[in-house]
Every structure is written in structure tokens, then in C-alpha cells.
């Protein structure tokens, strides 16, 4: 591709570095080309982000992790001017690099949002889709990193043509001087699967409690609802929602495909069940069905 490429990412949750899809687009021989890939973020997906892009854990299970994809990513953008729409995508890449102890790409980040503002000041706003649609780009309902990278590349091309900008102008006027990094948690190996004995202990306690009131609930895995919203709803109904399994836990709700696929929270619950603590276990879908019956 040419010296100028566009990049867009989608993320799995509220941490900017939780990349689950990367799209890159650029020009070669006067033809606009794009590349995209899913990324396994090694994290659970949050409902707000899933609602934006529609990506879930099942779709990325065989995708490369960011560490595995890093050599290919850096080869595609190092030494280039990388067009992004606001600084979110740059922050995502650099935050992921910091969390995984990866060397940041040696590139120059170019703010296409500011570029579009100067090229088309008459537009009501300069969001990617607003500007893209004004140039005739058709977008799908859900966000897609490949599609959005392609749109950013086209917007940058048209803006450069309208204002007669050189590569040097892009660097001097629109390059980001500083990118704020949010390192987030250090990401290690995926949690070891729950042993057969622990999984059997959980399965033996599978089923809903007798009542909803006074339950102390723990969530884990990729759940079919927004945890924060659900927690607020449950607190209103007299429940407690905690981040970890304790001596007061009465119910664990899991988004893992099987109890044996879970991590430390599932192990802790199984340990306590084997010690006699009356913890019940439900999948996310079973929990929603049970909750609907409590109204």
C-alpha cells in the first residue's frame, strides 16, 4: 500500500485496549484496498460494545490474539502515516501494546476528524458516518473495522484533494502530538480450565434458588446482558452483586459454554460448594429466564 493507510478498531469492553477487530485500508496502484481480521481479546465481551459491532466470543475463538497478530500489524503500519478518526484507534493500539509488553509501531498518527472539519466546515457534525454518507459511502447498521477503515481512507483522500494537501502537510497540520495510553490490566494466559471434579460440583448445583430476594450473586464470563445494568436492577430487588466469590455468595451466573470452561471464579464457587456452601449455578440464559419468572 501507499505511504498513507487508515486504521480502525473495535473493542470488546470499556477498556480502550480490548481490541477484538482491526481494519486497515489504503491505496495501491490507484485502487482502494482493505484488510480486516478479528482479534481474540482474551477478555469477556460487554453488552454495550456488542451492541455497536455485533462481535461476540464465539466469533473470535479461533482468531489470533493481539500478541500473535502484532508482527503483521506493525509490518503494515510502521513507517507510514496512519489515518485514524479521532485518537481512539491510536489509543487502542498503544494501550494494547503497553498491556502486552509489545513494542509500539513506529508510525505517525493522522487525525482524519480534524481533516474533515477543515475540508467540509458546512456539515452539521463530522462523525465518520456523517462525513462518509455525504461522500456517498453506504454503511451497514453495525460497525465493522474493515468498513470503517475503508471509509476513513476515502474521507482522507477526498479531503486531501479538496485542500491540495501533501504528505508533509498531513504531518505538520494533522499529526497527533501525543496519544494518551490506558495500559489496563496486564494480560497473561487465559485462565486454566476448571477441573473435572470442580465442574461436576457446579453441575450438581445447577438450577435456580427458591427466591430472588436476599441473593448474593457473582457474574463471570461472556454474559447475554450488561453487568452494570443488571446489577442495578438486582439491587433494587434486594439482592447483592459482588465481584468475587465469598462466604456470602449464593448464586454464580456464568457466560462460559460449560462450567469446565470457566476460570478462577468458577473454581472458587466449586471449592465452596464442595465445602458445603449452598451456592447455586446458572448460565446467563437460564438466569434471564428465571428472572423473568420472578416478576
Image: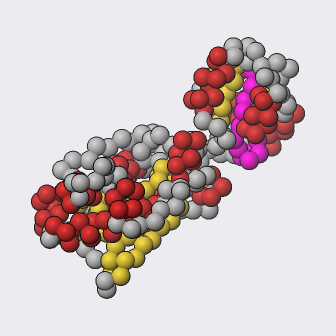
> For residue 258: magenta?
yes
**Residue 252 percent coordinates (x, y):** 72, 29
Q: Residue at x 61, y 52 (%)?
A: 56
Looking at this view, is 183 or 135 the one in front? 135
The quadrant in which residue 220 appears is: top right
Q: Residue at x 21, y 47 (%)?
A: 178
Q: Residue at x 47, y 53 (%)?
A: 10
**Residue 224 percent coordinates (x, y):** 67, 41
User: How many badges with numbers are in the image?
Assistant: 0
Q: Relative to 213, is 219 on the left or the right? A: left
**Residue 107 percent coordinates (x, y):** 25, 62
Q: Relative to 153, is 72 on the left or the right? A: right
> For residue 72: magenta?
no
Q: Relative to 69, is 61 on the left or the right? A: right
Vertical placement of residue 264 versus 32, above or below: above
Vertical placement of residue 72 versus 210, above or below: below
- Which residue sits furthest bottom? 29
Q: Is the C terminus in the top left, top right, bottom left or bottom right quadrant?
A: top right
Range covered by the magenta-colored residues: 247-264
Q: Tell me if residue 143 can be seen.
A: yes
Looking at this view, is 257 or 176 the one in front? 176
Q: Is the N terminus in the top left, top right, bottom left or bottom right quadrant?
A: bottom left
Q: Tell me if residue 189 can be seen.
A: no
Vertical placement of residue 147 versus 287, above or below: below
Looking at this view, is 192 or 293 the one in front? 293
**Colour approach in the figure:** secondary structure
**Residue 13 percent coordinates (x, y):** 51, 43
The quadrant in which residue 159 appears is: bottom left
Q: Residue at x 85, y 31 (%)?
A: 207
Amino acid at each position: 500500500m501507499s505511504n498513507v493507510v487508515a486504521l480502525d478498531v473495535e473493542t470488546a469492553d470499556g477498556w480502550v485496549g480490548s481490541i477484538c477487530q482491526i481494519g486497515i485500508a489504503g491505496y495501491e496502484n490507484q485502487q482502494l484496498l482493505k484488510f480486516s481480521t478479528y482479534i481474540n481479546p482474551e477478555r469477556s465481551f460487554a453488552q454495550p460494545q456488542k451492541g455497536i459491532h455485533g462481535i461476540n466470543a464465539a466469533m473470535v475463538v479461533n482468531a489470533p490474539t493481539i500478541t500473535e497478530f502484532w508482527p503483521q500489524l506493525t509490518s503494515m503500519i510502521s513507517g507510514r502515516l496512519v489515518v485514524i478518526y479521532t485518537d481512539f484507534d491510536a489509543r487502542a493500539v498503544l494501550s494494547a501494546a503497553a498491556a502486552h509488553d509489545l513494542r509500539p509501531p513506529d508510525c505517525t498518527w493522522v487525525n482524519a476528524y480534524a481533516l474533515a472539519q477543515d475540508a467540509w466546515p458546512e456539515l452539521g457534525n463530522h462523525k465518520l458516518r456523517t462525513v462518509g454518507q455525504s461522500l456517498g459511502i453506504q454503511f451497514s447498521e453495525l460497525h465493522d473495522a474493515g468498513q470503517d477503515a475503508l471509509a476513513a481512507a476515502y474521507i482522507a483522500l477526498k479531503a486531501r484533494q479538496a485542500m491540495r494537501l501533501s504528505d508533509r502537510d498531513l504531518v505538520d497540520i494533522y499529526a497527533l502530538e501525543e496519544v494518551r495510553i490506558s495500559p489496563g490490566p496486564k494480560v497473561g494466559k487465559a485462565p486454566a480450565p476448571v477441573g473435572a471434579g470442580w465442574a461436576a460440583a457446579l453441575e450438581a448445583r445447577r438450577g435456580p434458588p427458591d427466591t430472588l430476594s436476599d441473593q448474593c450473586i457473582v457474574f463471570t464470563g461472556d454474559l447475554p446482558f450488561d453487568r452494570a445494568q443488571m446489577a442495578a436492577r438486582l439491587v433494587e430487588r434486594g439482592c447483592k452483586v459482588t465481584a468475587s466469590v465469598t462466604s456470602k455468595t449464593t448464586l454464580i451466573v456464568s457466560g462460559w459454554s460449560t462450567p469446565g470452561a470457566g476460570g478462577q471464579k468458577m473454581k472458587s464457587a466449586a471449592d465452596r460448594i464442595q465445602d458445603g456452601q449452598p451456592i447455586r449455578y446458572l448460565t446467563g440464559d437460564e438466569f434471564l429466564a428465571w428472572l423473568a419468572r420472578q416478576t
